[in-house]
Image (spheres, helix red, strand yellow):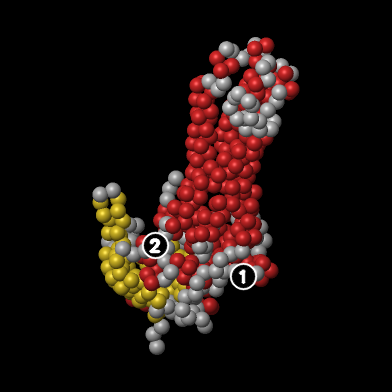
């Protein structure tokens, strides 16, 4: 039985730049199954980040519909959209987007504060999640005191705070070196296989394609093609003596 | 699995939680907070010093001692001069523009933070409330310090001009002289300065915060300053 978690119908997004209208998405139709690892791929400016924002309810489409868990997102109230972002989705960004005024621990507890989870419970959960991403000893550091890879780990822990069913990752490895990038990918893949989280990632990174179930190529705001992992040949070189 | 369940409504956070988050933010961004607060302090200090100076002049005129005091010229004996009114209006404008500018900058550089908080499930109203609390506190603290600095400045100037006579006729409380304009008194002026600083800080920050909170998170996070 197919279990579609995300479905887009003729999604169009236009940006107004002065008198010009830029059509970033030109009618996107995709369906994503629960538990899949999907990579959205395309050159910069292809519209993949814009699509990412539409799926995550971070922006509104100009035309068309986005359905998540069978719900039409454009019919949701502000409160429902906030709850959706809080409970159903975890976001991971290229530039981490941690709150610099809060420690690693404080960043991970924030979504739980919004969810109304009591003090003690959320503190324990944040510690557990930070332990899981390997930051047990740097929990109370501010983001400025962490390396890029460590910040992205905090972001992953934060994304998982409210047990989302979907993790959205927008170029999560773009600012990281190869080895750190690999570690982050492994961590995300692990969530996908062990916890059944649906992962939707916008990426250039061939290493990310390697772990994907399906790859959606986006070009000029359209789906160019959709490939299964086994249809493509990817040679991922190993670096630094890693197996 | 409740994943197919209909999407629930986001809850409101208790006020204490907002208070805690906003104080934490002020504490960690202490250096930046001080700069923003300094903008408010300067505006209110200028305002209060000009006003207090004016009150002192009026009080001394009332006392009938102005003719004996060298600092007051003939024109001033007729009441508030055009120059004084001009100075008072100017100080008010400087104060409003200075504070609005400080708060606008302080909020605009945090658009990304606002977008991120919304990604994590913050309601628009919660974001605005955070900024309201932060700026209200900054406004009050900055204005109080500013008012005291302004007062000190006016007293020093008064001492230089009128000597120790200043203290005999110091217009601390409101007064209504028989043949002169109503005097607010310095205490009320300070209170007024504090309230003004706080209100201006709140208006100056909540308007851009409200605008940013209304934006879809993707747009708020895209905003470059």
Earlier along the polypeptide chain: callout 1 or callout 2? 2
Dividing the picture into quadrants, the one containing residue A117 is bottom right
- The answer to whether B116 is drawn above or below residue B199 in the figure is below
Left or right: where B29 falls relative to A65: right
Residue to which mark 2 is pinned:
A59
Q: Position of residue B218 (x, y in %)?
A: 42, 58
Residue in the foreground of this view, choosing between B206 and A149: B206
Q: For label 2, count other residues whose C-alpha is less than 10 Å away and answer few (under 14), some (14-19) or many (20+).
A: some
Give the letter of the chain under mark 2: A
Residue closer to the observer: A106 or B207: B207
Q: At 42% from the left edge and 50% from the top edge, which residue is drawn? A: B223
Q: Which residue matches tag 1? A: A117
Q: Which of the numbered marks, if any, corresponds to residue A184?
A: none
Res A129 → quadrant: bottom right
**Residue A114: x, y in percent?**
56, 65
Q: Is residue A100 left or right of residue A138?
A: left
Q: Is residue B225 visible?
A: yes
The Cα atoms of the two marked residues, 1 and 2, are separated by 27 Å
Q: Quadrant of the C terminus of chain B?
A: top left
Q: Position of residue A30 (x, y in %)?
A: 33, 74
Residues packed near mark 1 inside 10 Å, few (<14), some (14 to 19) or many (20 plus): some
Which residue lies at the image location 47% right of the left edge and 49% below the top edge? B207
Residue B65: percent from left, percent from top = 68, 15
| Residue closer to the observer: A79 or A139 | A79
């Amino acid at each position: 039985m197919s279990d579609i978690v995300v479905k887009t119908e003729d999604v169009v997004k236009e940006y107004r730049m002065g008198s010009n209208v830029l059509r970033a998405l030109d009618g996107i139709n995709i369906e994503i199954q629960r538990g899949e690892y999907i990579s959205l791929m395309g050159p910069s400016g292809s519209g993949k980040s814009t699509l990412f924002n539409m799926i995550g309810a971070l922006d509104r489409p100009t035309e068309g519909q986005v359905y998540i868990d069978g719900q039409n997102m454009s019919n949701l109230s502000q409160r429902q959209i906030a709850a959706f972002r809080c409970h159903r989705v975890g976001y991971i960004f290229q530039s981490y987007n941690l709150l610099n005024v809060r420690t690693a621990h404080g960043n991970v507890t924030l979504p739980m504060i919004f969810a109304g989870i009591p003090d003690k419970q959320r503190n324990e959960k944040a510690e557990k999640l930070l332990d899981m991403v390997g930051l047990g000893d740097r929990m109370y550091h501010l983001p400025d005191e962490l390396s890029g890879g460590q910040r992205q780990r905090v972001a992953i822990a934060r994304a998982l705070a409210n047990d989302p069913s979907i993790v959205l990752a927008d170029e999560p490895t773009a600012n990281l070196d190869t080895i750190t990038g690999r570690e982050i990918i492994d961590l995300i893949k692990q969530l996908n296989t062990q916890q059944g989280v649906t992962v939707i990632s916008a990426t250039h990174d061939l290493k990310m394609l390697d772990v994907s179930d399906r790859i959606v190529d986006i070009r000029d705001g359209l789906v160019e093609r959709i490939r299964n992992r086994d249809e493509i040949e990817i040679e991922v070189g190993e670096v630094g003596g890693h197996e | 699995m409740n994943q197919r369940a209909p999407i629930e409504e986001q809850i409101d956070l208790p006020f204490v939680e907002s208070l805690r988050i906003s104080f934490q933010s002020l504490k960690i961004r202490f250096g930046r907070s001080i700069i923003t607060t300094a903008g408010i302090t300067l505006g209110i200090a200028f305002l209060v010093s000009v006003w207090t100076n004016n009150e002192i002049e009026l009080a001394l005129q009332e006392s009938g001692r102005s003719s004996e005091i060298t600092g007051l010229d003939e024109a001033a004996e007729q009441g508030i001069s055009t120059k004084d009114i001009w100075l008072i209006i100017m100080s008010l404008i400087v104060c409003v523009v200075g504070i609005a500018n400080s708060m606008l900058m302080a909020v605009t550089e945090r658009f990304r933070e606002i977008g991120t908080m919304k990604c994590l499930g913050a309601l628009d109203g919660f974001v605005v409330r955070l900024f309201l609390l932060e700026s209200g506190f900054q406004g009050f603290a900055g204005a109080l310090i500013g008012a005291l600095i302004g007062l000190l400045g006016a007293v020093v100037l008064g001492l230089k001009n009128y000597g120790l006579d200043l203290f005999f006729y110091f217009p601390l409380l409101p007064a209504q002289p028989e043949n002169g304009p109503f005097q607010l008194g310095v205490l009320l002026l300070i209170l007024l300065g504090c309230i003004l600083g706080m209100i201006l800080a709140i208006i100056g920050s909540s308007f851009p915060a409200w605008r940013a909170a209304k934006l879809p998170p993707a747009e708020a996070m895209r905003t470059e300053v």
